[in-house]
């Protein structure tokens, strides 16, 4: 089993040096972004996928603490967080003025900006990048809305294949309780209200999240990522994630 190679850079929060993960070859899904030297991407890209309220933030904050505590530099990215278009995307969604294609392309632009300006530079610097959702959510949302899978695969051919993807699966019934407890409301888009599944938001949320879960299960067979049961205690989920991430860091 390859061992991790500690290389000294600057002091981390609780350790005296920053660990650089074992290097493994990286690939794009398709043609990728032009001018990127994949061999220089020394960090790791770890994706946590899951529905609204599935516990992604809870897990990621514990992972960051653990990784930084053991000497790894980390960066968090997520959907709709680009400096380029996140505000405009939010505004356009409020106004409900986007067609399915333009909404999809808006999200793809947000993704491409973060890939180019945050994810790739961090990976070049040996950072462990934790992505709160990735192209799988973007594809699943569009597939549920009847968009063409080939078109989407082509669009996200720009994306880097992550070193690991973990999908936190939680039943729609559990999700609705968690989201209500957290926000006291359901979100228009996360309830799939644009799809006309039901005029009742609660009912629409259950139907939409069930369709998203089915789509994720199908994507899982294509992209072969583990489905992690998100209905256990946060600690037990985190233990499983740490075990799996340790293997990724060791280049296994
Ligand atoms: N394993 C768990 N079991 C029960 N409740 C949980 C679990 N993990 C998280 N929660 C609770 O569920 C709610 C949603 O969790 P969290 O914010 O981590 O989810 P999220 O996937 O990041 O949601 P969002 O889509 O809103 O960003 C929070 O109130 C959190 O305390
Ligand atoms: Mg969150």
Image (cartoon, helix red, strand yellow):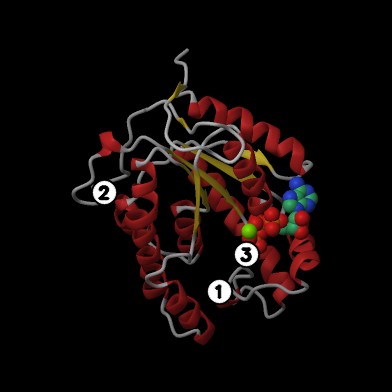
In the figure, 42 relative to 103: above or below?
Answer: above
Label at residue 195: 1
The residue closer to the viewer here, 75 or 216, is 75
In the figure, 117 relative to 160: above or below?
Answer: below
> Label 3 near label 1: C-beta < 8 Å?
yes
Name the front one of labels 3 and 2.
2
The residue closer to the viewer here, 16 or 52, is 16
Disc 3: which residue: 208
In the figure, 41 relative to 176: above or below?
Answer: above
Mark 1 closeness class: few <14, some 14–19, many ≥20 residues within 10 Å: few
Disc 2: which residue: 32
Nearer the N terminus, badge 1 or badge 2? 2
Q: Does the residue labelled 2 lie within 8 Å of ligand 2?
A: no
Ligand 2 quadrant?
bottom right
Determine whether, in the image, residue 22 is placed left or right of residue 94. Answer: left
Residue under the image location 70 percent in, 50 percent down: 170
Q: Percent position (x, y) of residue 118?
A: 39, 54
In the figure, 69 relative to 192: above or below?
Answer: above
Secondary structure under the numbered disc 2 in the rendered image: loop
Mark 2 closeness class: few <14, some 14–19, many ≥20 residues within 10 Å: some
Nearer the N terminus, badge 1 or badge 3? 1
């Amino acid at each position: 089993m390859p061992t991790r190679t500690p290389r000294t850079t600057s002091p981390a929060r609780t350790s005296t040096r920053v660990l650089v993960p074992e290097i493994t070859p990286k690939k794009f899904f398709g043609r990728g972004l032009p001018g990127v030297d994949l061999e220089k991407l020394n960090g790791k890209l770890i994706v946590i996928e899951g529905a609204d309220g599935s516990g992604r933030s809870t897990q990621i904050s514990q992972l960051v603490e653990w990784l930084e505590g053991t000497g790894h530099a980390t960066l968090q990215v997520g959907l709709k967080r680009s400096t380029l278009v996140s505000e405009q995307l939010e505004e356009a969604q409020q106004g409900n003025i986007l067609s399915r294609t333009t909404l999809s392309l808006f999200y793809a632009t947000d993704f491409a900006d973060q890939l180019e300006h945050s994810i790739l530079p961090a990976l070049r610097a040996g950072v462990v990048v934790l992505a709160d959702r990735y192209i799988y959510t973007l594809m699943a949302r569009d597939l549920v809305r009847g968009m063409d899978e080939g078109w989407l695969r082509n669009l996200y051919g720009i994306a880097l294949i992550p070193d690991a993807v973990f999908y936190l699966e939680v039943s729609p019934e559990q999700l609705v309780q968690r989201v209500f407890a957290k926000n006291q409301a359901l979100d228009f888009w996360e309830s799939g209200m644009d799809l006309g599944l039901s005029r009742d938001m609660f009912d629409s949320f259950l139907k939409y999240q069930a369709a998203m879960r089915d789509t994720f299960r199908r994507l899982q067979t294509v992209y072969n990522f583990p489905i992690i049961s998100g209905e256990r205690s946060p600690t037990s989920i985190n233990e499983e994630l740490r075990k799996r991430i340790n293997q990724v860091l060791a280049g296994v």
